[in-house]
Image (spheres, rainbow, N blue to C red):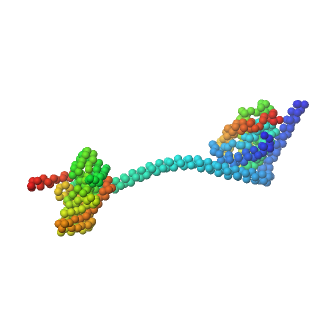
Amino acid sequence: MGNYLGVPLLLLAAMLQVSIVPQLPRVLGGEPNLVFLLVLAYAARATIEEGAAWAFLGGIVHDLVTSVPTGSTTFGLLLLVITIDRLRAQLFNVGFLTVIVLGVAGSLLLSIIGVAFTILSGFNVRIFDLITYQVLPSAAYNLVLIGPVYLLMRRFCPPPALAA
Amino acid sequence: MTQLSRRGTRANKAVYFTTLIIISLSLIAGSQSGLLAPIEGVLAVPLNAVTGVLTTAALRLSGQVADLAEVSSLQERNAQLEEALVRLQSEVTELRELSSDYQRLAGLVDYTSTARGQEFLAADVIAAEQAPLRTIIVNRGTRDGIQVEMPVVTAQGLVGRVIEVQSNASRVQLVTDPSSAISARLLTTRAEGTVMGQVSGNLEMTFIPLGARIEPGDLVYTSGLGGNLPPDILIGQVTSSREGLDLYQVAQVRSLVDFPVLEIVLIVTNFQPVDVTAFGQVGN
């Protein structure tokens, strides 16, 4: 699965993020971040360059359909991919459990970046409420979904060594 | 060579990532400053169009799912409401019954307050028959001190007489029974006669003296003659009259009691019938 397939997939994910996902019944105010899940799952399987490309594209389309400043999600996803690269260098392989941990950590990272840029944009944000009703529930949703998404991605995407 | 290659790869990665990070930070800066607004606007148009279609579809789907969920909920609610309706209808019926009973009892209380010297016992009508006798059965019997020949009345007038008593029920022969004969008098002229039941269910007052004036609307009361009933109990109202066999007059009398819907009656418990036949035998 390369970058060419990634473009429509990430576009679809970004559009589903703002169309279907808000209609789904949820606990509290959080919601899963589909683009984040796809990028994380793909970056854990593909080469780091491909992962970065997905992070860049995914972040752009995500920011275009959401209210956060364009580039902020890209920035967060790129940091995530860099982390995966560093972990891969340390652990030789980024497996299921690592992805799960990254699912929570990356979700929190993206949320923090989003909140930070939102505050920098001049919006008055109630941080405690945002963390309680948005950030933590979203991290929980991402934690639940990253496993299935990663397993699905593993079926269609060979490991980096084979891909190379 | 391998180390150089690795270093080169790392350097390439570093450049690659650094470039992307710089681009993303530039994008943020451009977006924050508004410089990217035109480009964002152009790119967002097709995205927003597709998103709009998806959102509409999602809303419809969500609405249909909600409708489906609501159908189940509505069905359950409907069942609950139907159950409540049945219960309330039952309560309404019960309350109407109570109201009706209250009206009747209030009428009976009025009647008992005007009928001085008489003691009454209220009884529910629990059965009725049309043949061979036109009777009703009330839920009072010997346990309640009921005896044969006790008069039975309502606020609208005479109902009949007790003809059979059991421990917890009594049979009352209605004044409309064809075998019933009651000594009566007209209120206005005091003319005497005998009110007899008819097969048709009406009443007829016979043996009224020829000279007696009878007016439609005259009230007919018990006379007390014969000792079977106390005097001055309303029997009915004259509707018409005629002469009978040139010896006496006959008047059609309509009872004010609505026998088919009779539910509560009063039994006059302190009336002691007098057996006047004993005097006839003495005389003979």
Q: Position of residue B268 (x, y in %)?
A: 24, 53
Q: Quadrant of residue B19?
A: top right
What residue is drawn where x is 34% and y is 53%? Answer: B101
Q: Position of residue A32 (x, y in %)?
A: 69, 42
Q: Is residue B177 above or below residue B145?
A: below
Observer-nearest of B147 and A56: B147
Q: Quadrant of the C terminus of chain B?
A: bottom left
Q: Is residue A138 above or below residue B202?
A: above
Residue B265 appears in the picture as rendered: no
Q: Position of residue B74 (x, y in %)?
A: 54, 49
What residue is drawn where x is 86% and y is 33%? Answer: B6
Observer-nearest of B45 and B228: B228
Observer-nearest of B151 and A104: B151
Q: Quadrant of the N terminus of chain B?
A: top right
Observer-nearest of B86 and A95: B86
Q: Position of residue B36 (x, y in %)?
A: 79, 51
Residue B138 appears in the picture as rendered: yes
What residue is drawn where x is 70% and y is 36%? Answer: A147
Tell me: B279 left or right of A27.
left
Tell me: B78 left or right of A36.
left
Q: Residue furthest right?
A: B1
How many marks do you count on the picture?
Answer: 0
What residue is drawn where x is 80% and y is 47%? Answer: B27
